Amino acid sequence: MADTGEGRTLVLADYHAGLEVALRRDGVELGNRSDERREAVLRLLAGTGADRVVLLGDVANAIGDPGETERRELDELFAALTERVPVTVTPGNHDGGLAALVADLGYDDPGAGHAVTVTDTAGTRLGAVGFVHGHTWPARDVLEAGIVCTAHEHPVVRLEDEVGGRRVERVWLRGGLAPAPFVAHAEGEGVEPPATGDRADLVVFPAFNDLTGGTWINEGQPFLSPFLPEGLANGEAYLLDGTRLGNYRSV
């Protein structure tokens, strides 16, 4: 949940509709979990009482136009959500055909329900919170928010117990927003640098879809985002239930 100062917003990242289709092409046989994913989102929406949903990119899985199975899943997801609340999507690197699909299905026109708004890849700001997928540099307005929410990394940690047992867990990352890389990028592009505040936070979301791979943050795996890890100051990792693990580099 994010309190933007303009309402309560349910924020989810890396939904990857239709991922099972891609996995089957790679030889991994899995049943279609689209109904489970959609119902999980609706339970969260009902439980939080949010009045908006923000999807932090990679809502789709196909890099280009979604196939039939993926298109159907997205149609059913957007239909269920827009009956209840408006939806904002900050598109990711897998969402190249998403804006056209949203328009083709009619969700860009609210009609009797709510609209799906697909922003620029540089993200958007709602009140005090900025949102961006994270595969591109955020817009200046996004960076000047008090909290910046991003995704793309699918951060995970490998945990080991005292007898050598291992498990992998999805995690959140949260720390300060370090302005240096964003200022350097703006200056290199010849545009005005963002006026980031000293108390701004950067939150990196885990993938909502538990079938995705991830960036092994506590084993030295390189980050994918152009502004990570440099843009995250004193980053700490949290399990999905909120358990604080401490500095992500030393988990």
Image: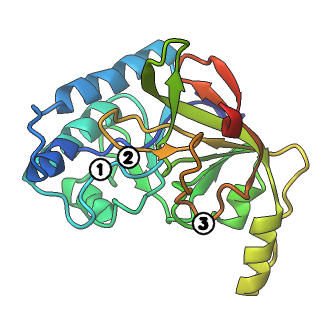
Q: Which marked residue is nearer to the observer: mark 2 or mark 3? A: 3
Name the residue rendered at 65%, 31% in the picture.
237
Residue named by callout 1: 107
Q: What amino acid is found at the position of numbered circle 2 in the picture? A: Ala
Secondary structure of the residue carrying tag 2 is loop
Q: Quadrant of residue 176?
A: top right
Residue named by callout 3: 226
85 and 216: which one is in front?
A: 216
Q: Position of residue 239 (x, y in %)?
A: 56, 23
Q: What amino acid is found at the position of numbered circle 3 in the picture? A: Pro
Q: Are marks 2 and 1 in contact (CB under 8 Å)?
A: yes
- For residue 177, the mark is none
Residue named by callout 2: 115
Task: Using a 10 Å C-alpha cutoff, classify the residue at mark 2 as few (fewer than 14 neighbours), some (14 to 19) or many (20 or more).
Answer: many
Q: Counting residues from the N terminus, which is met first, the one under dot 3 or under dot 1?
A: 1
Q: What amino acid is found at the position of numbered circle 1 in the picture? A: Tyr
Query: Eyeballing the image, is 8 above or below 175?
Result: above
Distance, label 2 to label 1, CA atoms, is 5 Å
Name the residue rendered at 78%, 56% in the picture.
144
Name the residue rendered at 46%, 13% in the picture.
47
Secondary structure of the residue carrying tag 1 is loop
